């Protein structure tokens, strides 16, 4: 897949995820978030763009854990 298509699908995934958080209807919110995850999975599993995969993996590892948030600390 070309780089522009990867970036387009990732941009759409981010847009759908953020729009899904603003919806009052739970069904519409879940549909938009499922589409966002599907677009991200297409890029990650079909694109074979290793630089992008490593960057997203670093982002995920940087995010705070649930256990740390339950204790009240950021990390």
Image (tube, helix red, strand yellow):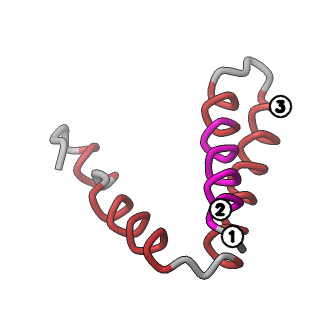
Mark 3 touches mark 1? (CB < 8 Å): no
Q: Nearer the viewer, residue 5 or 24?
A: 5
Q: Where does the image place residue 10, in percent across and percent down from the top left?
A: 62, 53
**Residue span colored magenta:** 3-15
- Name the residue carrying label 3: 28
Crowding near pointer 1: few (<14 within 10 Å), some, many (20+)?
Answer: few
- Disc 1, SS: loop
Disc nearest the viewer among 3 and 2? 2
State the mark number for residue 64: none
- As for residue 45 lying within the magenta part, the answer is no
- Disc 3, SS: helix
Q: Nearer the viewer, residue 57 or 26?
A: 57
Q: CA distance from mark 2 to mark 1?
A: 7 Å
Residue at 43% x, 64% y is 56
Crowding near pointer 2: few (<14 within 10 Å), some, many (20+)?
Answer: many
Crowding near pointer 3: few (<14 within 10 Å), some, many (20+)?
Answer: some
Q: Is residue 27 above or below residue 75?
A: above
Residue at 28% x, 44% y is 70
Mark 3 touches mark 2? (CB < 8 Å): no
Disc with the residue nearer the chain's start (3 vs 1): 1
- Name the residue carrying label 1: 2
Dominant SS in magenta:
helix
- Name the residue carrying label 2: 6
Mark 2 touches mark 1? (CB < 8 Å): yes
Q: Where does the image place residue 48, in percent across and percent down from the top left?
A: 60, 82
Q: Where does the image place residue 16, in percent across and percent down from the top left?
A: 70, 38
**Quarter of the image where the N terminus is located:** bottom right
Q: CA distance from mark 3 to mark 1?
A: 30 Å
């Amino acid at each position: 897949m070309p780089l522009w298509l990867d970036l387009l699908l990732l941009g759409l995934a981010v847009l759908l995820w953020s729009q899904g958080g603003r919806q009052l209807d739970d069904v519409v919110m879940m549909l938009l978030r499922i589409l966002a995850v599907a677009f991200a999975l297409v890029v990650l599993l079909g694109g074979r763009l290793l630089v992008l995969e490593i960057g997203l993996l670093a982002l995920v590892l940087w995010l705070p854990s649930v256990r740390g948030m339950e204790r009240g600390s950021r990390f």
